[in-house]
Image (cartoon, rainbow, N blue to C red):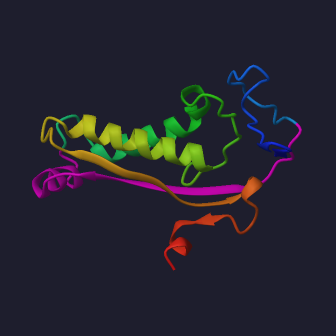
Amino acid sequence: MTSDVGPTLTHLDASGRVQRVEVGHKPLAARLATAQGQVRMSERTLEVILAGQGPKGNVVEAARLAGIMAAKRTPDLIPLCHPLPLTSITTGVEMEALTAVAVAALTLYDMAKALEKAMVIENIRLLRKYGGSSGPSGFDQNSLSQ
C-alpha cells in the first residue's frame, strides 16, 4: 500500500500503535516456504548425535518434533503473525518455516549441550517462498546469487 507521502505501514494504527491486520477476507492460497539453519559443533558431537546416543536420547528426532510443534505454534510466538491452516510441516510458510528451524536448532542444542556447550546456532534464513502474496514465482534465495 502507498499513500501520497510514501508507503503505508499496514500494521500500525492511526496513533502509531502496532496492530494485527484483518486477513479473513483473503482467499485460501497454496503456500510453500523452505528455511534452513546450521548448528556448528565438533565432529565427535555430531557422531554421537547421528548414532542416536545423545545424553537425553535421540537428538535428531526430538529436534524434528520440536520443529513441527513450533510451526504449529508460530502465531503464539511471533506478534502479529496470523494462524494459517498447515497441511504439512515438511515445509511451511515463511514465518512457520523460520520458527520451525529456529526451535529445532535450539532443541538440538538443548539435547546435546552435555556433550558440547560451544555449539553455535547460525544462518537461520528463508531459502524460498511461493504462493500467497508472493505469487507463483515467489522468492528463491538461489536465484539471487545467479
Q: Residue at x 18, y 51 (%)?
A: 41
State how many labels appear: 0
Depth order, front residue of 32/143: 143
Quadrant of the image occupied by residue 23: top right
Q: Residue at x 22, y 34 (%)?
A: 56
Q: Which percent across, then down, holds residue 50?
A: 23, 55
Depth order, front residue of 111/78: 78
Is residue 39 shown left or right of residue 20? Answer: left
Magenta residues, start to end:
25-53
52 part of magenta stretch:
yes
Depth order, front residue of 69/76: 76
Q: Which percent across, then down, holds residue 62?
A: 35, 40
Is residue 3 shown left or right of residue 46? Answer: right
Q: Which percent across, then down, holds residue 32?
A: 64, 57
Q: Residue at x 41, y 38 (%)?
A: 103
Judged from this view, the residue extending furthest toward the bottom is: 146
28 up-or-down from 17: above or below: below
Q: Residue at x 44, y 47 (%)?
A: 101
Quadrant of the image occupied by residue 82: top right
16 part of magenta stretch:
no
Quadrant of the image occupied by residue 114: top left
Depth order, front residue of 59/108: 108
Is residue 123 shown left or right of residue 146? Answer: left
Judged from this view, the residue extending furthest toward the front is: 5
Q: Which percent across, then down, holds residue 96?
A: 57, 43
